[in-house]
Amino acid sequence: MGSTRNHWSLEELAKLIDPVVQGWLNYYGRFYRTECVNVLRHVNDALARWTRRKYKRLKGRKVASVYWLGRLAQRDPNLLYLWRVGIRPAAGR
């Protein structure tokens, strides 16, 4: 993603990420779905790192940031295309 983009909201990041993720799933997911899902799980990891940089209460708390994202994915599964197709953070469900 280049810079940390800490001034962006998650909705703005979703607008940036969603077309790329959708393209990857459309192209690679047709023949290599499981591998594609494994690769795209790293997007959730990157989002967890972003939350640790953005929110002071999550700084240095890896598990808490994943749980925070997981709860957000449960509340609003349509926020990210990644979550819509079922690739959600592992914790917080």
Image (tube, rainbow, N blue to C red):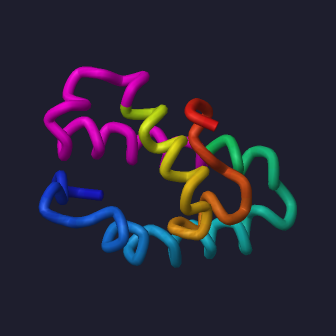
Total marks drawn? 0
Front residue of this view, candidates 54 and 31: 54
User: How far across and down, in percent of the image, does residue 79 sit?
Assistant: 51, 68
Residue shown at 48% from the left, 32% from the top = 67
- Position of the C terminus, as image quadrant, is top right
Residue shown at 67% from the left, 65% from the top = 84
Residue shown at 67% from the left, 41% from the top = 38
Q: What stretch is highlighted in magenta?
A: 40-64
Residue shown at 72% from the left, 54% from the top = 86
Q: Does the magenta stretch mainly form a helix, a strand or a loop?
A: helix
Left or right: where 57 falls relative to 25: left
Tell me where residue 90 sits by quadrant: top right
Q: Is residue 53 magenta?
A: yes
Outermost residue toward the right in this view: 31
Left or right: where 90 falls relative to 4: right
Q: In this view, does 78 lie above or below 19?
A: above
Q: Is residue 25 above or below residue 4?
A: below
Front residue of this view, candidates 10 and 76: 76
User: How far across and down, in percent of the image, does residue 42 sit?
Assistant: 52, 42
User: How far across and down, in percent of the image, does residue 16 sit?
Assistant: 38, 74
- Position of the N terminus, as image quadrant, is bottom left
